[in-house]
Structures are given as structure tokens and as C-alpha cells.
Image (cartoon, rainbow, N blue to C red):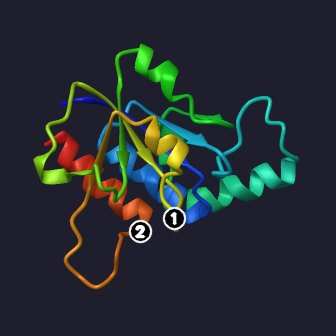
């Protein structure tokens, strides 16, 4: 099984963040990096106002159900992809794009960073251009994408098996 780090960049919903924590725990993700405006649980030396940090932590807990305590995580204002690449990780964006590889056809490397983008717009062009690979989940219904936390679960399952 590969070593996987997940980056959740610019995810608005605390419920999605909590669900991503829980999914990461279930698949043995090494670390979850929350970046951009993604809400995150309280941390030591938190610079946010205490009532804001506590409120976000409680909201994330509703869907994470304790996974936010188990899964190692960190917050970054900007996703630091180049640093992870120097550590031997392949940066894989989960995104519909002309250069995307269908998930079933992707052969995962041993060290992966799975990058998730915002709920509506996906991964920004800047971050998309920094990805080594893009993978896509085929859609068979009328909607054009899955919820970000559902898509994370599908992708993590496929990357692990």
C-alpha cells in the first residue's frame, strides 16, 4: 500500500472537512494537510480567536467523530507542494481536466499526495499546474461531479487497492 498524504485546499464546509478526516483515518492516511481557507480544528498556539477555533472544532467533530484527534494534521496557508515533492511524493490532483487519467487506469506510485480542491470550482489552475498527475472519477449520472468528501473516499480506496 502506498504512503498517502491528503491536502484539502479551500474546502468551505466543516462537515466535508470532518468527513475527510474520518475517511483519511479509515484508509490509514499518513497526514492530512488543510490549506487555504479550509477550516481546521484547534491547534497549539492557535492564532484564531478562541471562540472561533472552538466553534470550528466542534463543527468538524460532528462528522469526524474523533478522527480529527487520531489523524495527524497541519494547517498551511498555502499548499506547499514543492516541499513534498522533494520528499519523494508524487503530487496527484483529483480533478476533471483534459489531461486527467481515469482513476481505474492510474497506477499509483509508492508515495502520493492526493490534492483535493474546493467544492464548486475544484483545484485552482495554479495548483493544477503544479500536479505531477491528475486523476478523474468517471461520472455516469447527470451530475458532473461527486461531493468532495465522497470523491476523496472513492479515490483513496482506488489508490490503496
Describe the element under mark 2 as helix, strand or loop.
loop
- Describe residue 96's horizontal placement relative to residue 76 as left or right: left
**Within-10-Å neighbours for mark 2: few <14, some 14–19, many 20+:** few
Measuring from the top left, give residue 157's x and y in whole percent: 22, 50
Vertical arrangement, residue 61 with respect to residue 160, above or below? below
Q: Considering the image in quadrants, where does the N terminus appear? A: top left
Mark earlier in primary sequence (1, 2)? 1
Q: Residue at the location (59% across, 64% down)?
A: 13
Dividing the image into 4 quarters, which one contains the C terminus?
A: top left
Q: Is residue 136 above or below residue 6?
A: below
Q: Does residue 48 appear left or right of residue 96 in this picture?
A: right
Residue 76 falls left or right of residue 88: right
Q: Which residue is mark 1?
A: 119
Residue 23 image point, x, y percent: 37, 52
Q: Residue furthest bottom?
A: 142
Residue furthest out toward the front: 98
Look at mark 2 in the image and give the residue it sits on: 147
Q: Quadrant of residue 86?
A: top left
Residue at x-position 48% and y-position 59%: 122
**For the residue carrying disc 1, how many other residues have a C-alpha within 10 Å: few (<14), some (14-19), or many (20+)?**
some
Marks 1/2: CA–CA distance: 7 Å
The answer to which of 8 and 134 lies nearer the viewer is 134
Q: What label does residue 87 carry, if any? A: none
Q: Position of residue 15 (x, y in %)?
A: 55, 64
- Label 1 secondary element: loop
Taking the image as shown, residue 5 lies to the left or right of residue 126, namely: left
The front one of 51 and 126 is: 126
Q: Are marks 1 and 2 in contact (CB under 8 Å)?
A: yes
Q: Which quadrant of the structure image shows residue 55?
A: bottom right
Q: Is residue 29 above or below residue 53?
A: above
Measuring from the top left, give residue 95's x and y in whole percent: 37, 55
Tell me which residue sits at (50%, 23%) in the image. Answer: 82
Amino acid at each position: 500500500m502506498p504512503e498517502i498524504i491528503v491536502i484539502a485546499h479551500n474546502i468551505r464546509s466543516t462537515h466535508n472537512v470532518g468527513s475527510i478526516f474520518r475517511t483519511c483515518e479509515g484508509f490509514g492516511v499518513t497526514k492530512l494537510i488543510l490549506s487555504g481557507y479550509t477550516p481546521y480544528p484547534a491547534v497549539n498556539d492557535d492564532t484564531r480567536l478562541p471562540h472561533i477555533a472552538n466553534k470550528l472544532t466542534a463543527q468538524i467533530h460532528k462528522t469526524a467523530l474523533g478522527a480529527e484527534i487520531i489523524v495527524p494534521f497541519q494547517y498551511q496557508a498555502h499548499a506547499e507542494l514543492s516541499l513534498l515533492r522533494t520528499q519523494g511524493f508524487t503530487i496527484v490532483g483529483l480533478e476533471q481536466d483534459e489531461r486527467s487519467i481515469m482513476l481505474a487506469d492510474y497506477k499509483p506510485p509508492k508515495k502520493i499526495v492526493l490534492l483535493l480542491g474546493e467544492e464548486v470550482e475544484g483545484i485552482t489552475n495554479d495548483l493544477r499546474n503544479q500536479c505531477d498527475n491528475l486523476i478523474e472519477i468517471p461520472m455516469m449520472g447527470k451530475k458532473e461531479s461527486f461531493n468532495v468528501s465522497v470523491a476523496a473516499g472513492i479515490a483513496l480506496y482506488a489508490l490503496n487497492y
